Image (spheres, coloured by chain):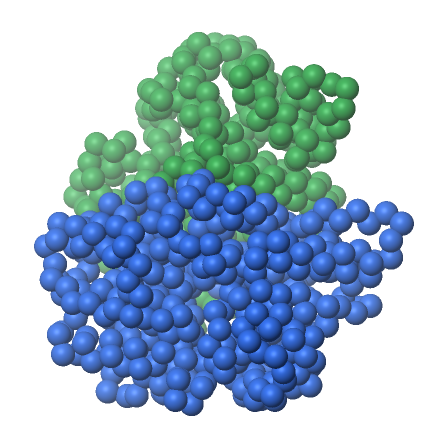
Chain colours: A green, B blue
Amino acid sequence: MQPFMYYNPTKLLFGKDQINQLSNEIGKYGRKILLVYGGGSIKRNGVYEKITYELKKANVEWVELMGVASNPKLSTVRRGIDICKREKIDFILAVGGGSVIDCTKAIVVGAKTEADVWNIICRKTRAIDGIPYGSIVTLAGTGAELSLSAVISNEETKEKRAFVSSFSRAKFSIVDPTLMISVPKKHTINGVVDTMSHLLEHYFHHGNNTNIQDEFLEAALRNVATTGTKLLQDLSNESYRETIAYASSIALSDQMNMGFVGDWGTHHIEHALSAVHDIPHGGGMAILFPKWMEYVLDDENVSRFKRFAVNVFGVDPSGKSDKQVAQEGIESLANLWKEWGAPSSLEHYDIHDDKTFSLIAHKTMETAPNCGNFRRLQKDDVLQILQKSL
Amino acid sequence: MQPFMYYNPTKLLFGKDQINQLSNEIGKYGRKILLVYGGGSIKRNGVYEKITYELKKANVEWVELMGVASNPKLSTVRRGIDICKREKIDFILAVGGGSVIDCTKAIVVGAKTEADVWNIICRKTRAIDGIPYGSIVTLAGTGAELSLSAVISNEETKEKRAFVSSFSRAKFSIVDPTLMISVPKKHTINGVVDTMSHLLEHYFHHGNNTNIQDEFLEAALRNVATTGTKLLQDLSNESYRETIAYASSIALSDQMNMGFVGDWGTHHIEHALSAVHDIPHGGGMAILFPKWMEYVLDDENVSRFKRFAVNVFGVDPSGKSDKQVAQEGIESLANLWKEWGAPSSLEHYDIHDDKTFSLIAHKTMETAPNCGNFRRLQKDDVLQILQKSL
């Protein structure tokens, strides 16, 4: 293992009806709350009512920032910062999936400085403080509730940047699967793919003496694969929602990658891709990850892919070359996601040619000059992976 | 799953040479340190030198509390509290295994109150504050470095009590396997058994929708079983030490039991047993756990034991009844520990008859009236398990 530091002081409140803990928790931190959410689905599915009931019970005032879109935009972050400063907000409550939580992570640091928040996101300026915040997850997948990092899109420059700050750790995160029952199929697919993609990024690493951790990842991947299939046939099943929510939360909590560093090259490519084309992250990962696997598989790393095929998808290795087994594993993953209805090529998002690929590859290398830890990618590698994705 | 709260803000610094982080960490918290350790092995194996080098580097003063014994004694706790009050200690550094860390957990709360610490340990008085502390683990097994609970023995009344306080969470814990290389075989065996016993206590539960967690536990158990065997043949192997240290730390970190509650009945019996006979906890668990398994196995819970046998020890179920498979699993565990040289009966500790059993059973029920969650035990059950252990 590589020496590591694990420090995750977010209080996770997980399970059925944990939303009822909100008034308790929020009362500890703030009197004037900024409630951040997305397109308004929480007003249709009863979640907004549950939350405002708890806010009233805690006897706190609140103002609202609505309309955080997927691939959260810098302009929305700026809007949130303005409200925080004007209204003297002392706590932020993010209600949604990764986009809402990521947007909040940027607001909390931006509201405590006179510096431009984009400079903080681009790591040119250091965050000096942060408004405390909590999150309520209504869409499983990104694991943003237990992670430090956030990804923000600058819609003017078409840049998408990931940043990390010690102030962007939630005080508490409520993950209540009963809030996820009404998530539509399309978003559910993207969420489950996103969870698997985090586990997969961890899995492809060159660490040593990590067999326990590798078996944990394999177990999580197997279970998410199986439960994902069941959930997509029975979207309102609370147990399946619970399993996926659990896997999603732990996948990015740093519990699943103790002592080694995963690849993450595909995430870098996807961030550049969705900066240019504004497609959903989970959809982008569904297209790119199997293509990345096909592209980087070689004689030196085949044993890792073979292990993946056998231990995650139960591929029978007898009578086959290592490469054949490895390829069957990759196909199994691609087929699984295809069966779910996840996109498998860029055509799905009306990207029919390679016109933007040079720009995407350029942006990938610009934000991630060291792109990929399992296999270091250069610009030409990124271009070839994009070509395969058409 | 049962709804759960996961909150573990201890900073874990894990891996080779992480001891070099000590001066950085300790400098954040204290100027006058109480250094708590055990019988002095750290003076013989170079650990004491490394630590005092770091303390000097951090430019802190320190005083020492040496001689914490296994099954840490209330009198030692009181001695530590006196030093803290007299010397105005503002940070405690525990260096050792579970005994030293548990002793420290009691000192930190006792030093911040005028109340009798035994009343806090017996949950008659609430802890009101705690001196911050950090731990450096030199013996893997108890997982005390990431847990809240501590067990203290009152040598006058022959009582052993477990207590939990929100102040007994370490600020940081350094788990550096290079510090464990010289741990003698006997202590190593007890540590590995203790780690397995924590995973086993988790594993026997009645939760539902916990397949991911169950597979995590099975993976950890398989790996600790295999690596334990290798380590005991090659005690100075750094990789094996690392694997066991990692498993030990996560086993009691609350990461391995999210959404369900394990049994813990055998731990209650062992605490009473070692309160009366002052035997090592790992040794007691090695004797008791397989006997508990044999005793509680019945037609209703056989599927759990069968799963254990197949998934942890690879027992082939074909042509066998569920009960036969279950029993083979229990035998596999007992045989593994016997091969390691762990005690398998109370004879090992010169307990040749049942004279003290009634007292032990009485103490078990006194401290744990609801003894065991997988199978609730009454006093007679405890007596029978003890009888089987002779």
Q: Which quarter of the figure is the N terminus of chain B placed in?
A: bottom right
Residue A96 percent coordinates (x, y):
48, 49
Judging depth in this view, the residue of B108 and B65 nearest the camera is B65
Residue B59 percent coordinates (x, y):
10, 54
Judging depth in this view, the residue of B174 and A154 nearest the camera is B174
Residue B222 vertical position relative to residue B134 in the rendered view, above or below: above
- Residue at 68 percent across and 79 percent down: it is B387
* Residue A269 shows up from this direction: no
User: Which residue is outermost to the right?
Assistant: B319
* Residue B114 shows up from this direction: yes
- Left or right: residue B259 versus residue B326 is left
Residue A99 percent coordinates (x, y):
44, 42
- Residue at 53 percent across and 66 percent down: it is B283
User: Which quadrant would residue A122 be assigned to in this image?
Assistant: top left
Q: Which quarter of the figure is the C terminus of chain B placed in?
A: bottom right
- Left or right: residue A266 versus residue B78 is right
Residue B311 percent coordinates (x, y):
70, 49
- Left or right: residue B310 versus residue A293 is right
User: Which quadrant would residue B11 be assigned to in this image?
Assistant: bottom left
- Residue at 46 percent across and 12 percent down: it is A381
User: Which quadrant would residue B145 be assigned to in this image?
Assistant: bottom left
